[in-house]
Amino acid sequence: MNLSLASWGNALHSGDKSYGIVRKRKWWFVVSAVLVGLSIASLVGLVGNGINPGIDFRGGSSFIVSGVSTTDLGPARQVVAEFVPDQVPITQVLTTGGVSSVRVEIGKSTDPAIDDATLSSEIENALAAAYGTPDHPAEVSSTFVGANWGADVTNKAIKGLIIFLVLVTMVMSMYFRAWRMAAAALVALFHDLVFTVGVYAAVGFEITPASVIGFLTILGYSLYDTVVVFDKVRENTANVTSQTRYTYDELANLAVNQTLVRSLNTSIVALLPVSSILFVGAFLLGAGTLKDISLALFVGMAVGTYSSIFVATPVEVALRDREPRIRQHTQAVLAARASGHGSVDADGNVRVGALIKGEHRGTAAQPKRKRRS
């Protein structure tokens, strides 16, 4: 048996091989519900420490101490405890190009009598003294983000997401002329976004503006993959009610199988450079911004491929099956099949070889007429 990817793809496209993805949609819905449930539990803190917004969203001060004599984080914690005893700082060691530095983040002070700008300057000087030596003084760069700036960044991120979803709904509805496909695409996008942010919360990564850019990027990628599958669904199911050999579910499942190899190939090619950025650029070189955006891209692209195959089309079919016209047609097909004109194999998958050869766009092949002598 030839197991090459090319022969597998040809068998899927011709209908010689088929997987009952749409037919087993209840299982995929259960899997997706579990993933979304775990992600929400991670976001609210039931699993892990919950979502961790960066100082760009919550406000506060960030210090990067370069030229350090030691990478011990103890001095940084002691300095913060001296000036802000009610806060637990976020501390980490950054390594870029073989040079180490210490990063310290603290939130906005809750004491109205304390001026945050003055406090930031005092902590900056204390960190320089704690990590430097007389011969090699440490250099400290600081960034202060006020509460108004953080709230403004949060509002803009939410507005950007809402505008994106509204435009997606309008474009999908106009292009496919079917609100069900737009609704299914939005369900898949919600699934991808919640899961990706849930992974961020589970691993403890900060949500930064770079992360938001990554979230919006993976939504566009997921939508692109879903549109390709839906376009094939629309092609296969055009004039579906004009024949009684295949149901809407079966022709939609054929579309998913026909685009399966294409979705996998595209995702693998896209994930290769992203994984290089994530594992090499972030973890080996210690580039924080690369880590923020590359994790969102890596997780989002992977789960976006899953949702375009196992979520979007099954949801669209579940909505379509509620139409009286589709229900009546499905009953007619099953009745014709029970009378001996079946078009499914032993596993219940539709045999679509005839569809590919002579029943394009859902039109049933007409039986050959016998010539009269």
Image: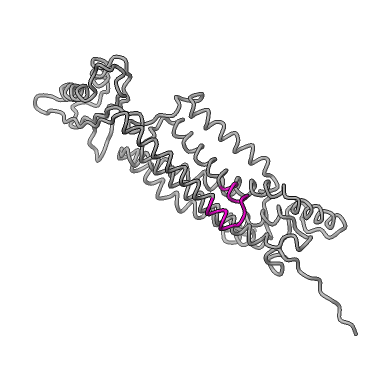
Overall secondary structure of the magenta section: helix
Left or right: where 278 falls relative to 42: left
Which quadrant of the figure contains the C terminus? bottom right
- Asked where in the image residue 214 lies, by quadrant, the reply is top left
Left or right: where 103 falls relative to 345: left
Residue occupying image coordinates x 25% and y 23%: 72
Q: Nearer the viewer, residue 11 or 324?
A: 324
Q: Is 81 in the magenta?
A: no
- Asked where in the image residue 212 lies, by quadrant, the reply is top left
Vertical position of residue 368 compared to residue 219: above or below:
below
Q: Position of residue 184 (x, y in %)?
A: 60, 47
Residue occupying image coordinates x 71% and y 55%: 248
Q: Position of residue 359 (x, y in %)?
A: 71, 67
Which quadrant of the figure contains the N terminus? bottom right
Outermost residue toward the left in this view: 135
Vertical position of residue 113 compared to residue 260: above or below:
above
Vertical position of residue 324 compared to residue 137: above or below:
below
Tell me where the magenta segment starts and ends, as one range: 170-185
Q: Is 175 in the magenta?
A: yes
Residue occupying image coordinates x 52% and y 42%: 192
